[in-house]
Amino acid sequence: MAEDEIRLVKFLSESGCASRRGAGELVKSGRVSVNGATVFEPGLRIKPGDRVELDGMAVCGGRQKVYLVLNKPVGYVCSAADRHADKLALDLLREVGERVFSAGRLDKDSEGMLIFSNDGEYIDFLSHPRYEVSKVYEVTTARPLEKNFRDGFVSGVELDGEVLRVLGVDELGKCKYRFRLNEGKKREIRRLCAFAGAPVKRLKRVRIGKLPLGNLPVGKYRFLNAEEVELSKQKG
């Protein structure tokens, strides 16, 4: 194997097409070609001069890596593929000038901290539960969450055939709580609170790793420096 060869999925993720895992799915679905031939093997190695195309468009490697944080407003959808969504979180990042994707998601009715980057390895690190990067949420419920339910959330609750578990729940005030998770299953906090008879009224992500959202205005973004990128990767 030549030293200058690179795995196709790494090339795609470093080019800003998708995260490393997402790039693998792109290849498996037949959307990627190398030198005019459709390929299906994510581990394929390519060399300098090979022409890589995604959906018929050339992919250029070696892009500058960018990292940014967005304070997502309620009503915006994180998926770029939702044709029925009126407002996409990516719409707020049009001035960035790079194709970026998010580390995890927030549902339409939730708000707060989202990290975006064109660095696929970084996004995978923040997203995959095996790296245990915690996320912190401030949650307001329609009625108090009883302590026995809060303790149960930490022990684990089986709902819809899967176990939902949080790292911790701290009471902040009347019907206000801080949730800490390192694996965000779909609408996990909302499902747990509904199970406890205390539906969520407001859900805001305020920290990823050791990086806080801070006072970033709703609907605005800013670029992260190298120190902040490292903070976001640390266990909270």
Image (spheres, rainbow, N blue to C red):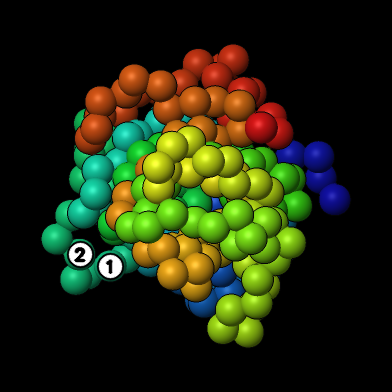
Q: Secondary structure at mark 2?
A: loop
Instruction: Please rate how many residues cluster around mark 2, counting C-alpha atoms within 10 Å: few if below 14, some from 14 to 19, many from 20.
Output: some
| In-image side of 14 versus 31 (left or right) | right
Q: Which residue is mark 2?
A: 85
Q: Disc 1 versus disc 2: distance between alpha carbons?
A: 6 Å
Q: Is 4 drawn above or below residue 108 in the view shown?
A: above
Q: Which residue is mark 1?
A: 82
Image quarter (top left, top right, bottom left or bottom right) of the C terminus: top right
Tell me the amino acid under the disc marked 2.
Answer: Ala
Rendering coords of residue 201 (x, y %): 31, 55
Rendering coords of residue 69 (x, y %): 40, 31
Q: Secondary structure at mark 1?
A: loop
Task: Note whether residue 170 is visible.
Answer: yes
Q: Residue at x 59, y 15 (%)?
A: 227
Rendering coords of residue 64 (x, y %): 48, 27
Residue 172 or 181: which is nearer the viewer? Answer: 172
Q: Is 214 drawn above or below residue 51 in the view shown?
A: above
Residue 34 or 167: which is nearer the viewer? Answer: 167
